[in-house]
């Protein structure tokens, strides 16, 4: 009797240990490997899909992965279905899965990081619950036409690049982005809407046709637009940003930032040949340089009190006048190197690059003071650094 007394707890413990082992790190080569997890509500470890897996992978019963779900070079994988999965604690990473057409996660709401690269056959997501919580989201070179199912409220990095079928992005719930937001190389008619985004860190945009950020108030880092096709940019509530750049936006006719007060860095406007009037009625402080060049008629900055870096403003237009800014220099508002030219046939940026897309002139680099336009190259990583550097050579 005493033997049974001790045997039963021992058996129970051994069964618990066995169950724990079977619900830990798992490598999936076939559907049978996945079926072995059917009784695991929680997988306490990583699930790795082997590159040899063929067909659609189904994960039944698993509600939480306390680790990562990963697959690399899975060239025969066609889809992943996980009807009960709610949480992936670490990363959801797929790369070089060229035949994947389906990602169906009915209950998924929380992911530590999404990192998808080279999924050209994937056109849509089946995430009906909506992923509302993700640390970073990096989606590169997919066939996605929208990001429906990505319903973030906050995000770290948000990098959406080289998705040439991506036509619309509406992240209705996003209120805060704590790291780089970068859009580049997607469909050139891409329309982006961030209706509730109030604060962000760094935001860079290329190859888009429109962007809406009506609630944006503050950026800790840069806000930059290069080579876009939008006609108008409006940030009605933006008061503060770091480096601010509008470069080579061929269709841009209007910039509206009526309450912008502070640029904590450099402010560049160049090669926007259809931009006729620039009005910044509340701008008071620029801690770096002002570097505007182009074909604009008017430039109004009546509230300007302090420019700590250089001041380079050049326009081809005969109606533009430097008189107001010359007085600002004399009054000590402009504290760095001063260079203002009206009716110049070949306007240039402070580093000697052409200020209009119609001009090929590139004079020698002009002198800049501390905090001048060269300070705009703030540290960035990955593809954002490439595009920022590329833009400087346009």
Image (cartoon, grey):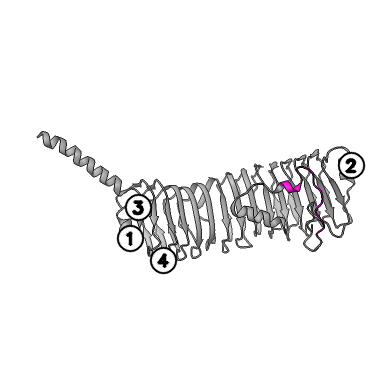
User: Which residue shows up at 37% across the image and 47% down it?
Assistant: 45
- Foreground residue, 67 or 229? 67
Q: Earlier in the sequence, mark 1 or mark 4?
A: 1
In the image: residue 323, left or right of residue 17: right
Whichever of labels 3 and 2 marks the residue nearer the N terminus, that label is: 3
The circle on residue 26 is 3
Mark 3 to mark 2: distance in Å? Answer: 71 Å
Q: Mark 3 or mark 4, which has the lower sequence index?
A: 3
Asked whether residue 228 is drawn in magenta, I would say no
Query: Between disc 2 and disc 4, whose residue precedes?
Result: 4
Q: Which residues are magenta?
A: 362-375
Q: Give the residue pinned by disc 1.
A: 31
Give SS at disc 2: helix
- Labels 2 & 1 near each other (Cβ < 8 A): no
Residue 372: within the magenta? yes
Circle nearer the viewer, 3 or 1: 3
Residue assigned mark 2: 327
- 1 over 138 or under it: above or below: above
Q: Secondary structure at mark 1?
A: helix
Q: Nearer the viewer, mark 3 or mark 2?
A: 3
């Amino acid at each position: 009797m005493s033997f049974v007394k001790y045997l039963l707890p021992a058996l129970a413990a051994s069964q618990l240990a066995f169950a724990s082992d079977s619900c830990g790190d798992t490598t999936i080569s076939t559907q049978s490997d996945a079926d072995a997890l059917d009784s695991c509500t929680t997988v306490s470890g990583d699930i790795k899909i082997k590159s040899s897996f063929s067909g659609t992978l189904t994960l039944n019963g698993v509600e939480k992965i306390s680790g990562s779900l990963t697959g690399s070079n899975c060239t025969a994988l066609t889809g992943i279905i996980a009807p009960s999965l709610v949480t992936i604690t670490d990363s959801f990473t797929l790369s070089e899965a060229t035949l994947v057409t389906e990602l169906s996660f009915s209950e998924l709401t929380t992911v530590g990081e999404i990192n998808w690269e080279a999924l050209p056959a994937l056109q849509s997501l089946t995430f009906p619950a909506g992923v509302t919580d993700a640390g970073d989201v990096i989606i590169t070179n997919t066939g996605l036409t929208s990001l429906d199912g990505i319903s973030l409220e906050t995000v770290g990095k948000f990098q959406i690049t080289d998705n040439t079928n991506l036509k619309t992005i509406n992240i209705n719930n996003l209120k805060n982005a704590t790291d780089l937001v970068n859009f580049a190389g997607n469909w050139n008619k891409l329309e982006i809407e961030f209706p509730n985004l109030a604060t962000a860190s760094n935001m860079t945009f290329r190859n888009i046709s429109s962007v809406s950020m009506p609630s944006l108030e503050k950026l800790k880092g840069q806000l930059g637009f290069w080579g876009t096709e939008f006609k108008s940019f409006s940030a009605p509530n933006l008061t503060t940003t770091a480096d601010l750049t509008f470069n080579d936006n061929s269709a841009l006719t209007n910039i509206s930032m009526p309450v912008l007060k502070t640029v904590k860095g450099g402010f560049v406007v160049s090669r926007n040949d259809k931009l006729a009037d620039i009005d910044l009625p509340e701008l008071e402080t620029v801690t770096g340089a002002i570097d505007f060049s182009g074909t604009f008629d008017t430039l109004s900055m009546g509230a300007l009190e302090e420019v700590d870096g250089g001041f380079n403003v050049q326009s081809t237009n005969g109606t533009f006048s430097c008189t107001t800014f010359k007085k600002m220099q004399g009054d000590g508002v402009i504290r760095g190197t001063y260079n203002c030219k009206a009716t110049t046939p070949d306007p240039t940026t402070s580093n000697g690059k052409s200020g209009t897309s119609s001009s090929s002139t590139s004079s020698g680099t002009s002198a800049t003071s501390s905090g001048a336009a060269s300070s705009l190259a703030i540290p960035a990583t990955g593809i954002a650094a490439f595009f920022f550097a590329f833009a400087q050579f346009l």
